[in-house]
C-alpha cells in the first residue's frame, strides 16, 4: 500500500493534483537569515497594524533548533511594523522550564529573549473566545492579554512533533495561545482521563479549533511565516533532548493563509527524496499529522491549493519539487 493511501480517517496526504478549490499565495525564499525572514514577512504584512503580537516558540533552555533570538532581534530592529511589537507566549501544560511564569521568565533570559517585551499571556488569568463551527469546542480558553493586541504575526519554526506529527503555524497558535491550565487541558485531555489522553485525529482537530478561535479574533490582521530550518522530528519543547536533525534545511515560507502555508511546508518535505525526508515524513504520518491540514480546510480556515512564488528568482511560480531540488544534506544553522 502506498504512503499516500496508507493513512485513514482524514489523515491522508492528498497529492496537489488531486486537491480542489481556490488557491492562495505562498511566498518562498531559500535565504535562511534575518534578511530572509524580513523579505518573506514584508510580502504578507499589509494588514499588520496597531499593537502587534508575535507568536513564536521561545523554547526550553538552550534548545538548539529554535529560530535564533538574534535573528528575531534584527528583524524587529529593521522592520517598521515590528519596532514596538511584543513576543507572546503562554505557560506550558507539561512540567519543564516554562510551566510556571517564574520559570518561564528565567528561561526567556537564558535563550536571549530580552530585546523586546515578552508577554506571558496567561500569567494573570484567561479569556474565552468562541470557536465557530467546531466539532469539539464552542470556545477556547486563552491567555488573558491576547485580546489586548490588534494584529498577530505567527513566526514559526517548522519541525516535527512527538504528538502532532509536525509543528507549523497551526500548532504554534493552537497550543501556544491556549492557557496552560484550562485551554491546553481541553486540547490534550478528556474529562476523567489521563493528562495526555487525546491523540491522532482528535488531537489534530482540537488544535485546529483552538487556532480558529485565535485567528477569527484577529480577522484579516494576521500573517504567517514558517522557517524550515534545523527540522528535528522533535518539537522545540523537548529542548536539548530533541532528536538529532537529519532533514535538509529548506528555506522560509510566508502567507496570509494559515492552511496554505502549513500545507506548502508539508508538500516541500514530501517532494524531497525518501532518504532526505524519511524520519520527518514518518513522524508526520505515524502521528496522523495530516489531519491538521484537512481539518483546517473543513473549518474554512484556508486553502490547501496555493501558488508558490519564488522570491529569489523574479517571483516566478514554482512547484514544491523545484523548491527543494537543490537542498543539501543537513548542516546545523546557528
Image (cartoon, grey):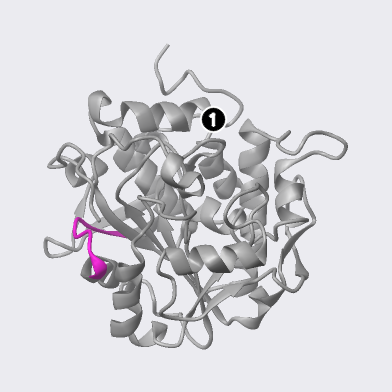
From the viewer's side, name the closer residue of 222 and 160: 160
Up-down: is 179 above or below 217? above
Where is residue 47? Give x, y as percent.
Answer: 45, 80
Where is residue 114? Give x, y as percent.
Answer: 44, 76
Q: Relative to residue 284, is residue 207 drawn left or right? A: right
> Which residues are the magenta region?
26-34
Quick one: which residue is furthest to the top in this view? Answer: 1
| Label 1 Cα neighbours within 10 Å, binned few <14 / some 14-19 / many ≥20 | many
Q: Relative to residue 93, is residue 324 drawn left or right? A: left
Identified at 88% across, 36% down, the residue is: 192
Look at the image and say whether residue 29 sits in the magenta stretch.
Answer: yes
Up-down: is 265 above or below 274? below
From the viewer's side, name the closer residue of 306 and 296: 296
Where is residue 194? Give x, y as percent.
Answer: 78, 34
Up-down: is 334 above or below 190? below
Quick one: which residue is furthest to the right in this view? Answer: 192
| Quadrant housing residue 10 | top right
Where is residue 14? Give x, y as percent.
Answer: 43, 33
Identified at 69% across, 68% down, the residue is: 122
Label total for image: 1
Question: Is residue 22 visible from the viewing direction of this image?
Answer: no
Residue that badge 1 annotates: 287
At numbered mark 1, what does the secondary structure look like: helix, strand or loop? loop
Placement of the N terminus among the 4 image quadrants? top left
Question: Is residue 39 visible from the viewing direction of this image?
Answer: yes
Look at the image and say whether residue 50 sits in the magenta stretch.
Answer: no
Identified at 52% across, 22% down, the residue is: 7
From the viewer's side, name the closer residue of 155 and 318: 155
Placement of the C terminus among the 4 image quadrants? bottom left
Amino acid at each position: 500500500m502506498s504512503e499516500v493511501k496508507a493513512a485513514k480517517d482524514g489523515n491522508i496526504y492528498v497529492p496537489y493534483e488531486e486537491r480542489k478549490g481556490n488557491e492562495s499565495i505562498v511566498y518562498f525564499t531559500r535565504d535562511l537569515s534575518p534578511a530572509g525572514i524580513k523579505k518573506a514577512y514584508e510580502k504578507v504584512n499589509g494588514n499588520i497594524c496597531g499593537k502587534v503580537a508575535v507568536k513564536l516558540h521561545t523554547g526550553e533552555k538552550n534548545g538548539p533548533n529554535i529560530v535564533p533570538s538574534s535573528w528575531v532581534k534584527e528583524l524587529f530592529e529593521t522592520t517598521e511594523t515590528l519596532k514596538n511589537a511584543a513576543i507572546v507566549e503562554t505557560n506550558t501544560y507539561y512540567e519543564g522550564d516554562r510551566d510556571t511564569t517564574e520559570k518561564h521568565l528565567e528561561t526567556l533570559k537564558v535563550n536571549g529573549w530580552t530585546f523586546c517585551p515578552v508577554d506571558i499571556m496567561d500569567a494573570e488569568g484567561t479569556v474565552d473566545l468562541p470557536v465557530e463551527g467546531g466539532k469539539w469546542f464552542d470556545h477556547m480558553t486563552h491567555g488573558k492579554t491576547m485580546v489586548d493586541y490588534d494584529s498577530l504575526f505567527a513566526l514559526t519554526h517548522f519541525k516535527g512533533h512527538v504528538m502532532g506529527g509536525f509543528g507549523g503555524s497551526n500548532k504554534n497558535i493552537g497550543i501556544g495561545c491556549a492557557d496552560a491550565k484550562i485551554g491546553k487541558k481541553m486540547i490534550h485531555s478528556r474529562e476523567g482521563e489521563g493528562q495526555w489522553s487525546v491523540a491522532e485525529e482528535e488531537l489534530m482537530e482540537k488544535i485546529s479549533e483552538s487556532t480558529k478561535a485565535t485567528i477569527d479574533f484577529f480577522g484579516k490582521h494576521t500573517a504567517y511565516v514558517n522557517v524550515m530550518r534545523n527540522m528535528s522530528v522533535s518539537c522545540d519543547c523537548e529542548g536539548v533532548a530533541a532528536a538529532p536533525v537529519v532533514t535538509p534545511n529548506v528555506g522560509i515560507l510566508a502567507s496570509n493563509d494559515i492552511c496554505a502555508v502549513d500545507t506548502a511546508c508539508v508538500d516541500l518535505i514530501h517532494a524531497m527524496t525518501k532518504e532526505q525526508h524519511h524520519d520527518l515524513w514518518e513522524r508526520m504520518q505515524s502521528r496522523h499529522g495530516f489531519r491538521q491540514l484537512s481539518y483546517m480546510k473543513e473549518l474554512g480556515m484556508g486553502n490547501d491549493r496555493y501558488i508558490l512564488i519564488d522570491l529569489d528568482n523574479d517571483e516566478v511560480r514554482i512547484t514544491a519539487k523545484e523548491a527543494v531540488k537543490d537542498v543539501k544534506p543537513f548542516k546545523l544553522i546557528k
